[in-house]
Image: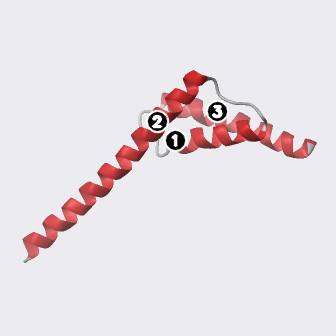
Amino acid sequence: MCNRKNKLRTALKYLEKAQRIEMKSRVVANPAGTRLNLCAVLSQLERSLPLKKLSHLSSTILSALAAIIIDGCMRQHTALTNCALQT
């Protein structure tokens, strides 16, 4: 059990470092993924994020989902437009 906690603490250290890097970066591929992994590790360590961070996390997740949906709609629209132009 002690070895598992050590691995979780190491994972937590790297996830926190990744989160700091992402916060400084302008373009981040998957910020919600990092935060979700951070929450999962904290949960395994029986700790949790403060409410303010959880609020920011939910906002980030919603923004990421919106971006995915918009991207999918734009791709579908482009495909339909291309199809209509070819006929």
The three-letter code of the residue at mark 2 reads: Thr
Residue found farthest to the bottom: 87
**Front of the two marks 3 and 2:** 2
Please tell me the numbered disc located at residue 17: 3
What quarter of the picture does the N terminus occupy? Answer: top right
Mark 2 burial class by Cα count in 10 Å: few <14, some 14-19, many 20+: some
Q: CA distance from mark 3 to mark 2?
A: 18 Å
The three-letter code of the residue at mark 1 reads: Ala
Q: CA distance from mark 3 to mark 1?
A: 15 Å
**Front of the two marks 3 and 1:** 1
Mark 1 burial class by Cα count in 10 Å: few <14, some 14-19, many 20+: many
Q: Nearer the viewer, residue 46 or 6?
A: 46
Q: Earlier in the sequence, mark 3 or mark 2?
A: 3
Q: Earlier in the sequence, mark 1 or mark 2?
A: 1
The residue identified by callout 2 is 60
Instruction: Find residue 17 and report its image quarter.
Output: top right
